[in-house]
Image (tube, rainbow, N blue to C red):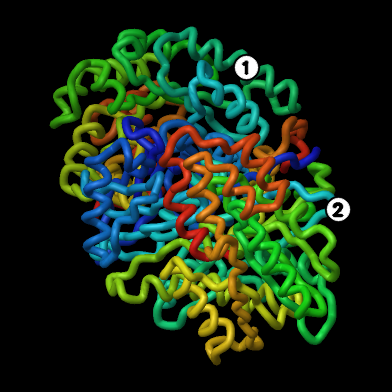
Amino acid sequence: MKIVREALAGTLESSDLMVRIAPREEGLEVVLQSEVIHQFGTQIEAVVRETLAKLAIVDGLVVIEDKGALDCVIRARVQTAVQRAVDEWTAEWSALS
Amino acid sequence: MPYVKCSNDFRRIGHYVRATSKDGNMTEEIISYAIDPALQSDERDEVCALLARSGLDYEQGVEAFVVFRRARRLIACAGLEKNVVKCTAIDPELRGEALGLRLLTEVVHLAHERGHSHLFLYTKPENVDFFRSCGFYPLAEVPGYVTLMENTPIGIRSYCDGLRRLRHDGAVIGAIVMNANPFTRGHRYLVDRAAAACDHLHVFVVAEDASLISYRDRFALVKSGIEGIPHLTLHPGSEYMVSRATFSAYFFKEKGVVGDCFTAIDLLLFRNWIAPALGITHRFVGTEPFCRTTHKYNADMQHWLREDVSPAPAIAVVEIPRVVHDEVPISASEVRRLLATGDFARIGGLVPPATLALLMAKYRQDRPSAARGGPGEAAVNRASA
Amino acid sequence: MKLRRSMLFLPGSNAAMLSTAFVYRPDSIMFDLEDAVSLREKDSARMLVFHALQMPIYRDIETVVRINPLSTPFGMKDLEAVVRAGADVIRLPKTDTAADVHALEAEVERIERECGREVGSTKLMAAIESASGVVNALAIATSSKRLIGIALAGFDYVMDMQTERGDGTELFYARCAVLHAARYAKIDAFDVVFGDLNDEAGFLKEVDLIKRLGFNGKSLINPRQIELLHNAFAPTEEEVDYARRVVAAAAAGERQGLGVVSLNGKMIDAPVIDHARVVLRRAEASGVRK
């Protein structure tokens, strides 16, 4: 799928995260800010990248403000942001788990 | 566990959200929704009262507010003027981080719905940590008075990375920031003089579309107007330079500092971020014989770019006297005045042919008031050559 | 028989509550995609609940999802997501007729087949929120084998009745109608949410009323209400003691192949034994009443 517009998902509240996604031509850039970046930064970014890979997102700028969200919340917010940023959402539910 | 109920639609029960009150243990229903202050005067009056209780003034330019109500009482608000978050307040009785995060979440989403994803806000330096937790990052600070923040950790960095690719080395690297509303022979003279004094000159055209002449037209006129001048890079403007964001007047209780701060932030952004990226050593401006505000802006420039108020290297400020036509210094404001009266014969003496042609084709004025421009234009004009 | 005293509402859009609510140990958790979610967040809440349902922390707790009505643009998408994610129960809001349940059931079955979930494993409950729903309560309660219960939702109901929430008089007929329909259909009956989170005494008074009427439990919007509710539903020491003796006598009677069981010279029949088992299960779940 292709990111065609800027989109926003999530909140700034505790245990959540805010995901901002924008079109970008050359490749994927993930910018992560987190209150727990030292302990979990690598893991969070891995979850984000894996979620995007499952959706076949190869180009885009993803900025994340994490407030200590669980992995499944991260997946949900990234998927929602992508859903809002593409013209045609073609993902099967089975690809989202 | 305390709750807040929110709703975009006032009549419908909305989502429950956690809020913390002073005693940390109250359970309340809070409703959240957006208002248009121009149409909803009752709501606006309550927003004014809340801002007053929080020591803040109501700003006229705000186009939309997110408000929270508890038991009918207005307890929090955050406003938007285009992409600038303003007038953010929470009832002093209820200060709590959770409520603040909820409020900022709502205003960021509202801004997004209104087409603004890149946001700025001004706050007192002591509130920087809170807004930092809301995903806003500091851009420039006047210690003790005000900090400008943007809602991305990579905004100005990627902008400056882009600038660095256009860097030219040399002993004297100059910069001019111009609104060129419209481009006159005075601008051409300023650029000529500056370019002659530099190894390389960077010219920026103010991007904010708040002027009589559209940004697109202003940029095209500058481009054709400076043709043939060597060692020059023409840059599109950006949010980081003489924009609604960097020039947004932030009103404190102590009104005296307003003027200083609102030029300081723009100048510090230039000194701390833009100038180092391009290696700029000198900033050139035309003298301002008419307008006291612009005269002061030039004086402020001397202070914020040169004095020991920033860790970034000092930048020399060079004022170049305006070129005179028929014994009157050429200025864009004079051109706009003549445009309002349709006096193209006299305009022809002040501007290059390309500008004259465009003004005749596109900007003939029927209404005598049009040349005054909006309030946004006034700020932008004051700041630019 | 599953104990369903407390059904905790969680706004589907609230990540923090979805991540932590299991610690309050309600009998059922109800993820809300309907009224607690603003129009703007319908998509994000659906996605969040889709993931929350699959979290290991909710494996041991009954999960209910209140979807948007199928007549809205959101209802079918909600259903597609949560049946696949393994929701135990789908709560249908604003159920006016048995046909509403039949329509839902057909879609649930289709999705079960599409995603390979055992057909019939997705249970349903119907929320009754209108005069029509109350009048049709019996038809609704008996409309599907998947139904585990029906719930009265007070806010919309009183609006439909052109009145407002008060001391409970306004709900009297609806409560009785819903309860009778549920008992006739041998499914559970759930009472309305108690809205004033600060009025503990008022909450307990209402809990006492609905327990005496015979409701299985109540929908809750605040985790603080769970313990209060469970305690109110907990039997007294004497009740537990009596129930133990009833169950023991029944077991003894069964061993001896007796058709009739007696305790202290009094005959006890099947309903009494069933009730004793409920009492013991409530005691097991949250002790004796404090």
Give the residue at mark 1: C107
The residue that appears at 51% across and 84% down in the rendered structure is B303
Chain under callout 1: C
Amino acid type of disc 2?
Glu
Q: Is residue B69 above or below residue B326?
A: above
Q: What amino acid type should be assigned to the residue bearing mark 1?
A: Glu
The x and y percentages for residue C142 are: 45, 12
Quadrant (top left, top right, bottom left, bottom right) of the C terminus of chain A: top right
* Relative vertical location of residue B279 with respect to residue B217 in this rendering, above or below: below
Q: Quadrant of residue A96?
A: top right
Q: x and y percent of residue A47 in the render?
A: 74, 56
On the picture, is B152 further left or further right than B227? left
Residue drawn at x 25%, y 34% as measured from the top left? C211
> SS for tag 2?
loop
Percent of width and height locating residue B258: 37, 71
Subunit ID for the residue under disc 2: A
Q: Which residue bears the numbered disc 2?
A: A26
Q: Residues within 10 Å of mark 1 (few under 14, many from 20)?
A: some
